[in-house]
Amino acid sequence: MPLRKEQPAFANNVKTKTNSTMNSLQVWTLLLSATAAAICLAGCASPSKWPGSVTKAPFGNAPDGTPVDIYTLRNAKGCEVRICNYGGIVVSLKVPDKSGKPGDVVLGYDNLDGYIKSSPYFGCLVGRYGNRIAKGKFTLNGKEYTLAVNNGPNSLHGGIKGFDKVVWTAKPLVGPLGPALGLGYVSKDGEEGYPGNLSVKAIYTWTDDNELHLDYTAATDKDTVVNLTHHSYFNLRGHGDNLGHVVQINADKFIPVDSTLIPTGELRPVKGTPFDFRTAMPIGARVNAKDEQIKFGGGYDHCWVINKQAGEFARHAVVYEPETGRVMEVWSTEPGLQFYGGNFLDGTITGKGGWTYQFRNGFCMEPQHFPDSPNQANFPSVVLKPGQIYKNTIVYKFSVR
Ligand code: BGC
C-alpha cells in the first residue's frame, strides 16, 4: 500500500466549495489551499534532516524560446527521477532490478529537441482532456464546443497543443513524503476549443519507497470538462518488447470502442475475453487474439472500469517483469485505467541511448475518467464548475519480487 494520506471520497472527483462565479485570483487561492493540504512547501519538513534532494539544470528551449529546465528528484535510497517542465515530462526513472542494479524503466529522449520534434506523448502530463473526444465536439449547458481534431476524426489528449507541449512553471518542493516538483499551468479560456480559464497544479513526489506520486488539482472560472492523466511508456526490462510483462488489472468490465477508438457506450464484462486481467496474465498471451476489440486497438488500447467507489484511492493494476523481477503497482482515485500497449510504436523513433522503439516496446497505464465522457451520458461526469476543485491522484509504485 503506498505511503500517502487517504483522499476523501467525493463523487466525480470534484469537491464543491461554493456555487458562485470566481475571479482568477480566487481560483488560485482555492487551488493553493487545496494543494497545501497534501503537500508542504519547502520549509515544512526540515531540509537538513531530509536525505533526498531536488536539483535543477538547463534542458534547452521550447519552440517559442522559453527556457526549459530538468529537475532531478533523488530519494533517500539514491534512486532518481528526472522531470522537465516542458510538458511535465518524466524523462527518466531509475529503479533497481532484483539484483539491485538500477535501470531506466521509461521510454523517451536524451534531449528536449527529441520531445519537441516528435513524441507519441512520452512521459508527459496529459490535458485538458486525456484520451479521445468524438469528432472533437461536445455540448455543455446547451452550447456546442468544437475542439482541435488531431487523431483521425477525433480530438486526442487535449488537441494540437495539449498540456504535453506547454512550459509549466516549476518549483522544487520538500513534501512530507520526499523530494517533489510543483508544476503550474493556466490554460486560457478557448484554448484548443475548451471553455473557461483552467488553473492546473501538478505535483510529482518521489518517495523513499520508490513511489512516484502525481497529485493534480485544477479550478475553472466557467463550466468546462477536465480529464488529466500521465503518459509514461514503461518497460520494466528497460528495452525490448513488452509481451513478457505480466499484468493484473482490478476490473470486471472494460469499455469497447469503435474503429476510431471511441467508446460504444457499453461497459462490457471482461469474462471470457482477452481483456480479462483479473488474474495476472502476460501481455503477449492474448494480444493477437481473433477479437474485434483487439483488432480495433491493434492490441490493447482500451479503458478498464476499475472495481471501486467513485473517488476512492485504490489499486488499479500490478505489472511484473519476470527477467528483472521488477514490479510496478498503479494506484489512483480515477474510475478508469487506459492500458495502451504501444501498438503505434513502429521502429521509426530512436530514443535514449540510441535505442529504437519497435512495435509494443513500451506500455502506458493511464488512470483517468472514461474516454469521450462529455458525449456519453451514462459515464461519470467530467464537468468542472467554478467553485469546485478537480482532484486526481496517481501513484506508480516500484519494487522487486
Ligand atoms: C492512446 C493511444 C494513442 C496514444 C498516443 C494513448 O493514450 O490510448 O490510442 O495512440 O495515447 O501516444
Image (spheres, rainbow, N blue to C red):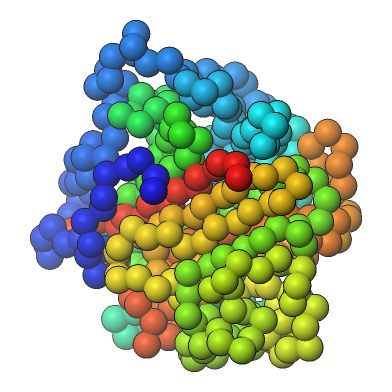
Viewer-side residue, 344 vs 330 = 330
135 vs 350: above or below: below
State the residue in front, 4 or 372.
4
Residue 196 as seen in the image, left or right of residue 263: left
Question: In the image, residue 122 lies at what x, y percent?
Answer: 67, 49
Q: Judge from the rendering whether residue 362 lies leftward or rightward of residue 33; answer left or right.
A: right
Q: Is residue 214 left or right of residue 352?
A: left
Q: Is residue 273 above or below residue 277?
A: below
- Quarter of the figure that contains the C terminus: top right
> Where is residue 335 drawn, in percent x and y?
40, 69
Q: Is residue 385 visible?
A: no
- In the rendered image, which quarter is residue 369 located in? bottom left
Q: Residue at x 43, y 59 (%)?
A: 315
The relative height of residue 233 versus residue 67 in the rendered view (above or below) is below
Residue 361: give x, y in percent of width and height.
79, 55
Q: How many marks?
A: 0
- The residue sitting at 48% across, 40% down in the picture is 212
Residue 394 x, y percent position in the rendering: 43, 52
Of 107 and 348, the residue lying toward us: 107
For the question of whether residue 392 can be seen, the reply is yes
| Residue that lies at the very extreme toward the top in this rendered image | 48
Location of residue 183 (image quadrant): top left
Residue at image coords 52%, 61%: 317
Look at 47% across and 63% down and name the residue there.
316
- Left or right position of 47 against 37: right
